[in-house]
Amino acid sequence: MQDLALLTDFYQLSMMQGYFREKKEQVAVFDMYFRKHPCGGAYAVLCGIDSVVEYISGLKFSKSDIEYLKSLNFFDDEFLNYLENFKFSGEIYAIKEGSIVFAHEPLVRVRAKIIEAQLIETAILSMINFQTLIATKASRVVRSAVNDPVMEFGLRRAQEKDAGVYGSRASVIAGCAGTSNVLAGKMFGLSVLGTHSHSWIQSFDSELEAFRAYARNYPDATVLLVDTYDVLQSGVINAITVFKELREAGHEPVGIRIDSGDLEYLSKQARVMLDEAGFKNAKITGSNDLDEYSIEHLKNLGAKIDNWGVGTKLITSYDHPSLGGVYKLAATQKDGKIEPKIKISNDPRKINNPGFKQIYRLYDKDTNKALADLITTDDEVIDESKEFEIFHPLYTYKRRLVKNFYAKKLLEPLFIDGKFVGKKRSVKEIAKFHQEEKASFWDEHLRNINPQSYKVDLSQKLWEIRENLLQEYRTKI
């Protein structure tokens, strides 16, 4: 397991030393959440929880870590001795990986000694911010492709190897059929996909010779890249020649890939040529800087593309490069009693929800569709036998009476007393769960353009705690 104790910001360690001297036994509650849905959408796909589990499970300072920190001449020996024996001993609750989540909801809730909870902030944010961002982008791309398979091809354009590996994992969780990333395939049991590049074609004396050589090596998996020279005047014609030779030898070709040019026009013409030659089952794969918008546009134009290869704009979340998740102190605990804390800002979106919280997702009993999420204090219980009024936390006149519903708690235990108590799931299991999650939401909340906002409200009790803290602050200034 990789040593990640120093995967943190320096100020976390400087605060830890301060806490060590001032209040090392103080227990605190932190929430990790994001404030704005990525890519202009109305939801996100939670990803990265498994990375957090691995990080917390292996969290310790090595001898070389301590030596490095000592060389900075900033930390005293007593604090470094504490770090030598450091082990996370608190509790962590989180929403299940693969879930549909929304802005301002605690995705991860940490209750621990503040000296421990402070250290893990940066790593948790790094892991969940990136992987959730890419999973959300992939989910949007897959949605645009409707029922067509999407292949993730982003490794070479990723922001370094770890982004490529964990971006591939996130993409498959969100619905991609597979990845070009072989290491990710090995690590996470993903389907790995790919054929050949333009260099294969260029390395032979002719395109036809290159196609024949590839088909000779992979007669039952022949997909030919047809845009090295000219798609319609050369590539598709030569592909058809080789496909006929394959069929005569008892093999059926898989299809072609077009990686440049006008994908609408070229795919339509290629489809006609393939069909007329007797290869109606040959698939056409389209690639070339695609994203959810270009795929939706091409499908609306009737492009004859069966599979989509998406790389750069997925793995970098090209139009929204950061989730912007935050990790905020929500409460302290003294003598077993929770004391809510609030951060105040001139921007209402940056005022956190205080306290020790839980999230309930309310579902319609008849349709099993999600109706709203309710952020509550941890000790609240939702009575499903009665009508329940929810209201907008800022515009409180916006209210709705929920009837005939059932409620599910979203935050589940991962660590208790520093020990992992959750359940490890494979990527396939998480991906299956994600598809079930998406099916439980009405389409208007998931659409890529002009989505309808999903209701995320505060319970009356939590709203009053928040308002009382704001009022208390106002009386002090």
Image (spheres, rainbow, N blue to C red):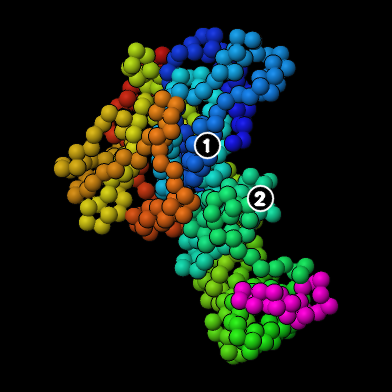
Residue numbers of the magenta segment: 201-222
Q: Residue at x 54, y 64 (%)?
A: 150
Image coordinates for residue 410, horizontal then vertical, percent:
35, 40
Q: Residue at x 60, y 28 (%)?
A: 5
* Amino acid on which the number 1 mark rests in the picture: Glu
Image coordinates for residue 448, horizontal then vertical, percent:
47, 57
* Residue where numbered disc 2 is placed: 158
Q: Residue at x 56, y 70 (%)?
A: 307
Q: Is residue 374 above or below residue 332?
A: below
Task: Report helix, strand or loop for mark 2.
Answer: loop
Quarter occupied by the N terminus:
top right
The residue nearer to you, when weighing 246 against 407, is 246
* Amino acid on which the number 2 mark rests in the picture: Ala
The residue nearer to you, when weighing 241 against 437, is 241
* Residue where numbered disc 1 is placed: 54
Q: Residue furthest right?
A: 205
- In the rendered view, does 456 fall on the left or right side of 347? left
- In the rendered view, does 212 fall on the left or right side of 182? right
Image coordinates for residue 148, horizontal then vertical, percent:
50, 68
Q: Residue at x 33, y 22 (%)?
A: 468
Classify mark 2: residues with Cα within 10 Å, few (<14), some (14-19) or many (20+).
many
Image coordinates for residue 227, horizontal then vertical, percent:
71, 74
Q: Is residue 318 above or below residue 352?
A: below
* Sequence order check, earlier mark of 2 and 1: 1
Quadrant hosting residue 28: top left
Task: Report helix, strand or loop for mark 1.
Answer: helix
Q: Is residue 90 above or below residue 446?
A: above
Q: Is residue 219 rendered magenta in the image?
A: yes
